Image (cartoon, coloured by chain):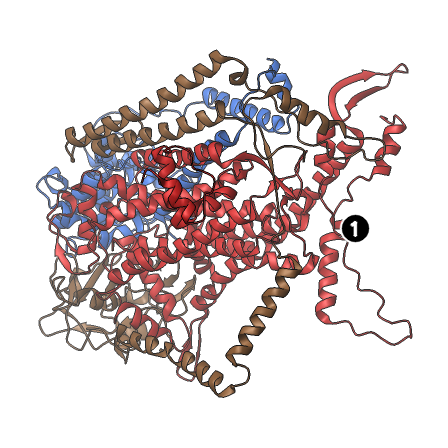
Amino acid sequence: MSTTASNTNASGGGAGRSRGPAPAGERLADWADGRLGIYSLAKSNMRKIFPDHWSFMLGEVCLYSFIIIILTGVYLTLFFHPSMNEVVYHGSYVPLQGQMMSEAFNSTLHISFEVRGGLLIRQIHHWAALIFLAGMFVHMMRVFFTGAFRKPREVNWLFGFLLFVLGMFTGFTGYSLPDDLLSGTGVRFMEGAILSVPIVGTYLSFFLFGGQFPGHDFVARFYSIHILLLPGIMLGLLVAHLILVFYHKHTQFAGPGKTNNNVVGMPLLPVYMAKAGGFFFLVFGVIAAIAAIAQINPIWAIGPYRPDQVSTGAQPDWYMGFSEGLIRVMPGWEINFWGHTLVLGVFIPLIIFPLVLVAIAVYPFIEAWVTGDRREHHILDRPRNAPTRTAFGAAWISWYFVLLIGGGNDLWATHFHLSINAITWFVRVAFFVVPVITFVVTKRICLGLQRRDKDKVLHGRESGIIKRLPHGEFIEVHEPLSQEQLYTLTAHEQYEPVELGPTVDENGVERKVKGSQKLRAKLSNAYYGEDNQIQKPTVEEYREITSGHGHH
Amino acid sequence: MKKLSARRRHPLAAVVVLLLALAATGGLYTAFAPASKAKADDTAQSLTIEEGKKLYEVGCASCHGTGGQGTTDGPSLVGVGAAAVDFQVGTGRMPAQQPGAQVPRKKVIYNQAQIDQLAAYIASLGAGPAVPTKNQYSPEGADVAKGGELFRTNCAQCHNFTGKGGALTHGKFAPELTGVSPKHIYEAMQTGPQNMPSFPDTTMTEKNKKDIIAYLNAVNGDETENPGGLELGGLGPVSEGLFAWIFGLGALIAVAVWVAARTAKAKKS
Amino acid sequence: MSSQDIPEENLPAEQAAEHGHGAVSLADEKHPFADPGLPPHEHRIQDVDERAAKRSERTVALLFTISMLATIGFIASYVAIPHDKSIFVFPLGHINALNFALGITLGVALFAIGAGAVHWARTLMSDAEVADERHPIEASPEVRAKVHSDFKQGAKESAIGRRKLIRNTMFGALTLVPLSGVMLLRDLGPLPHNSLRHTLWAKGKRLVNMNTNLPLRPEDVAVGSLTFAKPDGLEETNEDFQEQIAKAALMIVRLQPENIKDKRELDWSHQGIVAYSKICTHVGCPISLYEQQTHHVLCPCHQSTFDLSDGARVIFGPAGHALPQLRIGVDSEGYLQALGDFEEPVGPAFWERG
């Protein structure tokens, strides 16, 4: 052991290191390198550069809350009994004494009231789950609005999207495990939704529940899905997601010294080791404090599940809220024919539910097709510089939020003294109208901001200093921008709209233009046509104005 | 001050100023707005039906008719019983202020003696449920857990798991049960005010009602413990989701901004 | 740009020189928007003032110490505070003392570690920005050609293109083998048959009040009241209670017979007493928000609204059809009884419902 030099030399690595005995840590590293090749890995990664921006830490919020969820989840499995056997409650919570309940519910009460710290871990687990999903949503939007999904990161966008969707279902199955009255109502809804599937719905429902609803199986089945199947897939995707982040190197905003061929920031060791490592503790600390001060999912107040009982305000956790909105505002269409029933009132929302998500997931591929751009992009767009994309994203978010409002219509009704029927009608109309309005308005705002940027570049920034000219006119003095600002505001690229070219070739023969080509040209014009982006200032424009001393 | 003037030109400065101005205006308004007038009405005390009739003619007859037979503005009161009067007037719902989807609970304007007089008068118009005695509604000796089961079967669908209230059709609502006295809860179950169905003793025994009151007292009383911390309105996932977004993710983003921010430089002021 | 791969810690002169000449190459008349390069590194207070650096060091150490104390506090709380002790904390209300103490100490212990590490990184570690070169992800044309030719070589050596029989049977085998896995899922549950069409209700079954567990008489049910009933003999302790009550739960109200608009509803009622399924026809929530003045009943889950005075038809919301009504009458002893099962399936609609 003390003469590692000869060993490493024999294995072909670490040549030329035959000085005296190395420190223990170094020897351990040498040992590992000889077997795992860690030095070549560390060479490219130990001093890896990460750029500093708060929005680049949103992904870390998700990563860390996921780790917190796994840690606390493992603890909860030590006490939770995934069984639907009916037992009589004899624990310490008085208002449920002697009630019949499933063992799952009973053991959740046990965790909450008798296991010391059990309630805290349960609340951390649940709060972290809500924050995990919220973090993924915001992280995804950050990536979307800055165009970070462009080549070479499309695959990672899909991994992230899958993580979000799987996170929703992992959350839903976990929420259903305590078998309380609220989650049971959610599972009942799920059964109704499955029953609405044409032809196979009834069979699917009987297979999932092991017979008639609620049966005695679903908690155990959801348990294995919740703690093994879905988190397992998610863990794999997560690792792949992170490997790709390392491999692609992080994107950065345009700025002095930052180009498409470099990444400017601080090295992983030591700065990001400390910042990112520290951030894990910060996230965990914040969530633990939240779990100490705010109660979540008080199943004892909700009561055990019985299919003939219900409470008003029956909603799923927030990430399923948009599907709740879909189902609440859908008109009750039902078609009967030849002895069969097509339950459109439930089946249509069930179809739209994935479409809402897919709409945002496929966007990068649509944009790539429209631009036809095959280069790598590592410089992020400012949202205003991609008005159509930004408008689409804003429209999607507004759509999502309209549905969230629909999902909570009863609470908006009671808390803002509105009619629940009026809110439902509002959502029915807004589902179609609000995204369009948001699209138009956002695009206009983006174009306005582009114009302002152009104005700033050409005329300088408003200094707030009012000057009186000799002939009595008042003007505001504009200060020219610094070189850094000039560069930053003009660094973005602008695409030209695709031209279809003449439809008749030089011999006068009509050239066939494919429908898809026409569509692409149309879309391209909608993205990059004259009215859809503001041409950034050119050198000529700048020189004309500055050389003429043209400050009004 | 130097810092302040430097940030004056910040794009968000206008927003901040606007918010401050709005907050100031709102604060001033609440400070100086006329306080709602306390209408202490101390007329003479008498327990007779005659006194009740007098009160009725002043306060109620315009909607419910001179003999309690009802008009287009208010239902007939014949046979509703003293319990209904005690509930409606005792919770301030009656006299109603304005027509609407539902008459809300508000400040009580009669004292208990006057309410008793009114109740006595209405009870004299036709037989109906009497005002319950303390013995009937007091939660002592009741089965809290049974009350919980009964509450979830009969009440939670409108009033929420622990009586936080909920929405009904066209702007109507099932009110929050926080701070409602046991007597009024008992009377509401017995008489079915407004759109609430009644739960008469024939289908929900006195003992059942007592259990329900005891359960409410346990889960929605002044001393009710929320072991996990802030109750967040007891409304379930919607308020939890809002909290997670605003305070959970909000706090984490604030932390992220600090982690990623540049440290102060030596030369800058 | 011109910055190095390896940042030297605190090398003011060199750093400034480095970036200085980057900035020299800036805007001339021809390129007014040229990239000025990375700005020169500016020093933090801690870089130039050793006392400030010491202060930072002490702050970081203090944060780590706070964390240690908080962990000790966590252990002390765990041991000392009884698990059922309640305390009043403004503005949180009456809360569990142990949960609060454990959560706050754990939160502080973790947060202080994080805050210490980040403060350390922000104030004492080098904050010089470094640029790393990116390399194209696509392989060079030579590598690409090599991989393609290797693959072709391999494919050729396997002869998969030539020996079509092998290829086709292999694909066949690989396609079929997952079917075994699908087959194994068959026993997840029984087939539905017609179990969704039947409930426990049958001719002569008495309606038992959910509150009192006693059979109901017509005179018990007052106009404007709301009662829930289950079939006689179904007890909470039964093995299949949940499955049965999920279909059999009943909602009983009494209307003035002249207020009943639907003729069949009147026929199936007893003296204005009507019995409807409590299970919503939308997705199966127990619907029961009965408004006694309007006779509307609202579902708390998705706001389907039914008019109980008009055959329980849907007047708002996503439900597709009326609530099923149970035909009731009175038996020889004067108790309310069912006159048969529901004539249509209760609860959410399904493909075979028809």
Q: Quadrant of residue C289?
A: bottom left
Q: How many tags in the picture?
A: 1
Q: In this rendered view, identify the residue nearer to me: A33 or C269.
A: A33
- In the image, the chain rendered in blue is B
Q: Is residue A513 above or below residue A362?
A: below
Q: Is residue B191 above or below residue C330?
A: above
Quadrant of the snapshot with the C terminus of chain B: top right
User: Residue C46, position in %: x, y?
Assistant: 51, 17
Q: Residue at x 71, y 36 (%)?
A: A489
Query: Which amino acid does the dot numbered 1 rest on?
Result: Glu
- In the image, the chain rendered in red is A
Q: In this rendered view, identify the residue nearer to me: B26 or C226.
A: B26
To which chain does the residue with label 1 belong? A
Q: Colour of chain C?
A: brown
Whether residue A217 is visible:
yes
Q: In this rendered view, identify the residue nearer to me: A312 or C71.
A: C71
User: Residue C316, position in %: x, y?
Assistant: 43, 61
Q: Which residue is mark 1?
A: A530
User: Residue B157, position in %: x, y?
Assistant: 29, 53
Direction from residue B135 to residue A314 in the image, left or right: right
Q: Quadrant of residue B86?
A: top left
- Near mark 1 (Cα within 10 A), the count class, few <14, some 14-19 or many ≥20, is few
Direction from residue B185 to residue A373 in the image, left or right: right
User: Residue A403, position in %: x, y?
Assistant: 49, 53
Direction from residue C76 to residue B254 in the image, left or right: right
Whether residue B193 is visible:
no
Q: Is residue A375 above or below residue B108?
A: below
Q: Residue at x 68, y 47 (%)?
A: A387
